[in-house]
Amino acid sequence: MERHIFSSEDAVLGALANFFVATADQAIAARGRFAVALSGGSSPKKLYELLASDAYRVQVAWGKVYFFFGDERTVPKTSPDSNYLMAKKALFDPLDTRPDHVFAVDTALAPAEAAAQYGVAIEEFFGDEPARFDLVLLGLGDNAHTASLFPHTPVLHDASVGVKDVFVAELNTTRITLTAPLLNQARATAFLVYGAGKAIAVQQILEGPRDVDQYPAQLIAPAGGNVHWFLDEAAAADLK
Ligand SMILES: O=C1O[C@H](COP(=O)(O)O)[C@@H](O)[C@H](O)[C@H]1O
């Protein structure tokens, strides 16, 4: 695990954009394509906008990039809460991404069916190989959730390599999430966390006692150990 701490939000975003470019380059050189699972919520929007900017759009062979989502909200694709819609506006549309390179959760289906279908779509994409994303991008909630692995939810103890629907009582809603075992098959994982509101959660996850029910992001531990935390000083303020 590596921590990368920067003095400003812009510096964190630039560093993670560079990491994205380098990881995409390596994957494309090695396997001819780059499969990335995107995070949702508010934090990554600026990262996606940066990647689609003039400075970065020329640095990635976007035609070889395949986009997935680490989690999704059970809302229509047109909802402002949709992770897909956020990425579409910030990244897919500005890059003129081919629709068959974007794997979105079908939230028109019932949650269990949507999760099962998304799991099949991922399996089919990887074919005979294990489902190993080249990069999983993750965010962090101030309650220590990541993807839609929320505190004290049954999916935290799901040992399957797949996609699940999960009722999140604290939000009174159902989410769709990749399970921790699937996320942990990734070749590389990068957390993007900035802002003082995340400082306590960052410290608890990285330095607190292991308690995955309370701090679900502690579940993220890929076998190869290739996990990177991109933090600004405000989010890292409570680290020793
Ligand atoms: O609900 C979600 O929250 C986390 C963190 O989001 P943020 O708005 O605090 O940046 C995010 O990683 C996840 O994908 C999203 O669905």
Image: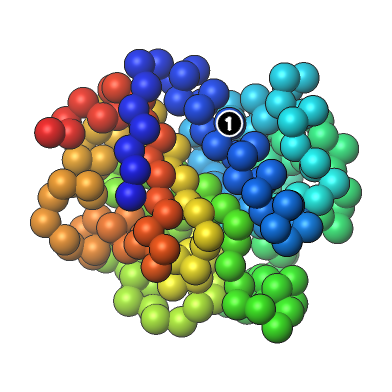
The reply, left or right, for residue 152 in relation to residue 40 is left
**Res. 24 in view:** yes
| Figure check: 27 above or below 125 | above
In the visual, does 221 lie left or right of 54?
Answer: left
Which residue is painted at 24% across and 42% down in the image? 201
The location of residue 22, given as percent across then percent down, is 61, 39
Please name the residue that numbered disc 1 is placed on.
Answer: 18
Compare residues 65 and 141 and report the one nearer the observer: 65
Where does the image place residue 93, in percent across and percent down from the top left?
82, 36
Residue at horizontal 80 percent and vertical 42 percent from the top: 62
- The local secondary structure at tag 1 comes to helix
Does residue 177 appear in the picture of this structure? Answer: no
86 above or below 175?
Answer: above
* Residue at the image point whose x is 29% and y is 29% from the top: 235
**What is the three-letter code of the residue carrying label 1?**
Asn
Expressed as whole percent of the image width and height from the top left, the position of residue 212 reads 24, 63
Q: Nearer the viewer, residue 39 or 176?
A: 39
- Residue found at x 40% / y 16%: 8
Q: Residues within 10 Å of mark 1 (few under 14, many from 20)?
A: some
Q: Compared to 215, does 45 lie above or below?
A: above
Name the quarter where the C terminus is drawn. Answer: top left
The x, y position of residue 136, in whole percent, is 53, 53
